[in-house]
Structure formats: C-alpha cells, structure tokens
Image: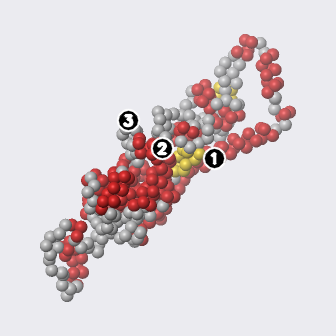
Amino acid sequence: MKPTLRLLPVVLASLMAACATTPPPAKNPVPAPAIAPSPISSPAPATSVAAVVQPSVAAEDTDVWGKLRNSFAMSDCDADPQIMVWAHRYTQNPQHFEAQMGSALSQVVYVQQVAEKYNVAGEFVLLPWVESQYHAVPGHRNLPAGMWQIVPSTAHSMGLHVDHGYDGRLDTSAATDRVMHMLRGYYDELHDWRLVDYAFNRGEFAIQHMVQQHGLPPTEPAIPKWPVPRVTKEHLTKLLALACVIRDPSRFNVTLPTLAAEDHLEAVDITPGMTLSATANHAGMLADDLRHLNPAMSKDALDSASGSQILMPHRNAEQWRNAMQSANAQDMTASNAPLTDTPSSKDAEVTQDSAPAAVKSHTVRTHTVKPGESLWQIAHKYSVSVNTLERLNNLHGKPLKPGQVLKLDTP
C-alpha cells in the first residue's frame, strides 16, 4: 500500500492544499514496518508521550483520570489499527463498561498511587483490567490468581507468601507493591515499556533472550514486530487500547466514573491479635465489605502470616485510627488512676472466693454497650479476647448496638 493512500482518510484536505508537492514515485511493495509512517499514526518516543495534549475533563475527574493520563508513557490511540479495534470492543456497551470501571475504581486509584511510588508508566495501572478486570480470581493448584493473575512460582520469586490460610496473590496491597517493584526492575533493564509488558506476559528471561538476539526494537511500530506469540502482542495491544479509552472517553461515548476522596483506599497496619471482624467494627464497616476489599484474608484472625496491611476506604481508616487512639487513651487513664478509685483485683478475688461454690459457678460478667464503643475496646477493658466475645455473644462480624448486653465469660 502506498504511503499516500494511508494518509488519504485523514489528511485529504491538506494534500489538496499542498498539491504542488509531488509525492515520491511508487516503489516495490515492502513489509509493513518499512512503510513510512503517517504523522498521525507515528508514536512519540516513550519519554515524551506523556506530554500529549489530553482531552478536557470535568474538575472532579482531574485527581483520578487526569493524573493517570499525565502518567501515560506509550503510544496513543492511532499508533496501530488494532489498538482502536480493541478499544471499540471494550466499549461496545458503554454503560456496561462504565459500570465495570465504577466498581473497580477504588482499586484503580490505589494501584495508580503505588505505580507513582515506583515511577511506573501509567498504562500499567490498567494491567489488572487486561488480566482480570480487577477481580480477585482465586488460585487453584498451579493456576494464576488475584487481579494480577500471578502463578505460584512467580509469587514465590516476588516474595508473596501463599499457604492454606493466606494467599498473597489476592492481597491487593502486597501484590500491587511487588508487581510495581518488578515492573520498575524490568524497565531499568530493558528501557522500553513495551518490552516490560512483553516480559510480564511472556516472562523476563524469554524477553532478555530476544533482546540478545534482535536488540532493542525501534520506537515504531507501536507493537514491536518481534517473533513473540500472538497472545503476547495482543496483551500489549489491549493495554494500549484501555489507555486509549481513558485518553479520550468521549470518542467511545463513555463517561468515566468519579470517586470521592474519602472513598480512596488506604492501607493500614494490621494490629496483632485482632480479628478482621473486630477491625471492621472499629472502622464502622461491615465485616463482609472489609473482607471483599481484602480477599487474601481467608480466616478472621489477623496475624503476621496474613500480611502486614489491610485495605479500607479513607473515611473508615480515619474512624479506625480514632478508635485505636481512644482505646489507648482509656488504657493510659486506667493505668494512672489511684488504687482507691477502683476495686482492686485482690478485693475481687476475695469477694469471689468468699461466695458459695454454687453461686460462683453461675456468676457471669456482662457489659452494656455504650454509644461509639467497639468490640476491641470492650475486650481490652475486661482483659478478654475479641474471639471470646464474638463466640460468647454469637457476633462474628455483626456490628454492636448501644444498649446491647454482652457476656464477658462463661458460667
């Protein structure tokens, strides 16, 4: 195909205005990579694409989508026809696409923050969409798992712990940090974000071997003409297609969703000895909602074997921190109080020991829940475990209600 024919749909008016310029004589057909690229379809170098003028966005979108657009570092929509093909496939039902993106938006924002921390190209924030549409796919045997679709051997090399009670591949916080660290390492070695995506899909050593054989690919075409499997080329094409939709959503009749700052996800440190249900209660959340955000936590107990952090919306993280501070303040007040202010443990023991055996065996301590009180605070106050309170009162993640009477021990 002649270069002028490729340009005809886009720059016909310009050619008519510049008709005095004679096109070069036709040559024998050559492979596609050798065809002179048009000014529109030519991708900018990886270091300059982020400077491409972005479509205007609403003010509430700027923090999320504008920031993401400004971090893109690869070719745009018109760099390859297949990019547009996949962009239209993703958005063939605009309302469905918007709904899917809306349900994943809090994760998108969190992944973008981690990508920024490692200075990874913004397109890779959309990588979980290509892999799983941000779904926490459970792992079975040696199959990939998590929204990043990591196989067990890769998880081991990345330092993600996997056992019957915890799968680090499903831990959004831990897995995202490890993946972004890995992608940055790929780029520092390969110096081409396209090859970084190839390495993620095909394997680092396979791409290293191809670089040794063929050298680094030229900046054009956007999808390197390397002898890699079709699925590997398609993987990069899909990633660029999603970035294309984010670059110019109106081109696909899509309105990108928004997310209030208080709904942005935040990683908080796990408190040893607490349970996921107690943590949810502190944070003013339903245990099922917190578990949905942290699918790696297959058991209620939170310990070092279950990861070091847990994700929750910012507003809930604030409430959780306030609850912890309040509990600590109560501990300090209790520890500094004069002995005469409260009955001593010795007095309590004497009273219990002097009671008839039949009475002692049926004595059960109780506590009436006060407004704003959490299960953890109550457990801490009476030196019992949260698990014990949940078991005795059949709570298991149910929120506390003011006036509710809790059993503190068994008869």
Q: Nearer the viewer, residue 104 or 207?
A: 207
Residue 292 % position (x, y):
47, 41
Residue topped by disc 1: 321
Secondary-structure class at tag 2: loop
> Is 334 above or below relative to 72?
above
**Rendered image quadrant of residue 209:** bottom left
> Is 393 above or below relative to 12?
above
Farthest bottom residue?
20
Secondary-structure class at tag 1: helix
Which of the colour schemes (rainbow, by chain, secondary structure, one colour) is used? secondary structure
Farthest right residue?
340
The quadrant of the rendering that contains the N terminus is bottom left
Residue 169 % position (x, y):
45, 43
Residue at position x 58%, y 47% in the image: 268
Residue 166 % position (x, y):
49, 37
Going from N to C along the chain, the mark reached first, 1 or 3, is 3
Q: Nearer the viewer, residue 122 or 17?
A: 122
Going from N to C along the chain, the mark reached first, 2 or 1, is 2
Going from N to C along the chain, the mark reached first, 3 or 2, is 3
In the image, which is nearer the foreground, mark 1 or mark 3?
3
Does 163 sit left or right of 225 as displayed?
A: right
> Neighbour class for label 1 at 10 Å: few (<14), some, many (≥20)?
some
Residue topped by disc 3: 141
Q: CA distance from mark 2 to mark 1?
A: 27 Å
**Type of amino acid under label 1:** Arg
> Is 300 above or below relative to 4?
above
**Type of amino acid under label 2:** Leu
Residue topped by disc 2: 160
Q: CA distance from mark 3 to mark 2?
A: 16 Å
Secondary-structure class at tag 3: loop
Residue at position x 78%, y 15% in the image: 355
